[in-house]
Amino acid sequence: ISQNEALADVELRVVVIGSSGPSQFLLTNSILGREEFPQDVCSIARSRKNYGEIAGRRVAVVNGPNLYDKDLSPTKMKEELRRCKCLSSPGPHALLLTFDLANICPNDIKTPKLIMKHFGKNCRNYTTVLLAYEGDLDRGALDERVMRTDWHLRELVEQCGCRYHFFNKDWKERNRDRELLQKIERMLAAMGGRFYTSHSYRQAEESVRKEEMKLKKKRAPETERVWHELEEQYRGEELRWQIESYNAGVGAEIRAKAEMDNSWLRTSLAVGTGLGFAAGATLGMVIGSVEGPGGIAVGGAVGGAVGGASGGAVQVAIEHKYACVC
């Protein structure tokens, strides 16, 4: 395994996909342990990536628009799914297909095939059905409904290797996070511990890495200057730690920018207004996730780097623009 692949596997990457309604965004709130999306949001105009933890493990959660969003044309949907791949490259460890348990319909049975159409036929081996419920429901009764009494549900989960998991719509109820993580890890173990990839994911990752290299070259003079400044302030182990912290922050920022703007995306996306908000949100989450006792010391350096490199491209938009299609 290459160094880049090893680094890529430090975090658990999950793509959360919904067919309709707010279930995928409620699941994201549950995984992150915070209200990243309002309770009533049913779809988003731009794919987004957020960071958090699930049962103590760092996780990157990528959300795209709901698959049956009537406000998005087929072309726009295809573009957003391509963006979704860039945000989850080099490939997701799991695709979580979400539904509202109270609103399963015959049309939902088609969703796994639609996922395979967009992500590749082998993605089914990495897909788990997530079912949102409200209140206190008996686990035995839920399992009975899935596997015996509701043929819609049974056919749906059978298409995904009979992998399914229940989650409460109240994101504050996170007592089943460890169980979800264990199910994802068992699924990965069955696939040899490797994340999912495909031709399109390889294209996305290659383009992201090329963009990273360009950005690193542009930042090289600034990086060397900051290293010299740190060398004047610290010695020995503390110096090493400060430099590593700074490198990690800049590296994460560069990666986030490369995922949001690269040649593979530019072949089909118009990089412009909407990118500013999405990139800004992503960069904010990335920099916020770099923690440690040296944070204050390198804060100015990283902050200056972010401000200098991002400039007007990631300036932006305080208000969230959601497209609700409930």
Image (tube, rainbow, N blue to C red):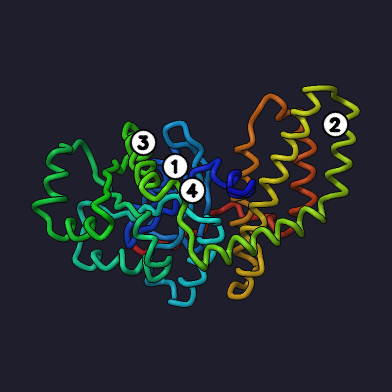
Callout 3–callout 4 Cβ contact below 8 Å: no
Mark 2 or mark 4: whose residue is earlier in sequence: 4
Left or right of 169: which side holds 60? right
Of the image marks 1 and 4, the number of the one nearer the N terminus: 4
- Callout 1 secondary element: loop
Residue 35: which numbered mark, if any? 1
Task: Classify 197 as above or below 165.
Answer: below
The three-letter amino acid code for the residue at tag 1 is Glu
Instruction: Report x, y in % for residue 206.
Output: 63, 63
In the rendering, at what x and y percent does residue 191 appear?
Answer: 39, 50
**In the rendered image, the vertical position of residue 50 relative to residue 64, given as above or below:** above
Q: Amino acid at mark 2?
A: Leu
Residue nearest the observer in this picture, 151 or 26? 151
Q: Nearer the viewer, residue 236 or 30?
A: 236
Q: Nearer the viewer, residue 90 or 323?
A: 90
Q: CA distance from mark 2 to mark 1?
A: 37 Å
For disc 4, the neighbor class at 10 Å (few under 14, some 14 to 19, many from 20) is many
Q: Residue 287 placed where, x, y %?
A: 65, 41
Are circles 1 and 4 on residues that touch, CB within 8 Å?
A: no
Residue at (26% x, 53% y) in the render = 100
Lower position in the chain sequence, tag 3 or tag 4: 4
The residue indicated by pointer 3 is: 177
Q: Residues within 10 Å of mark 2 (few under 14, many from 20)?
A: many
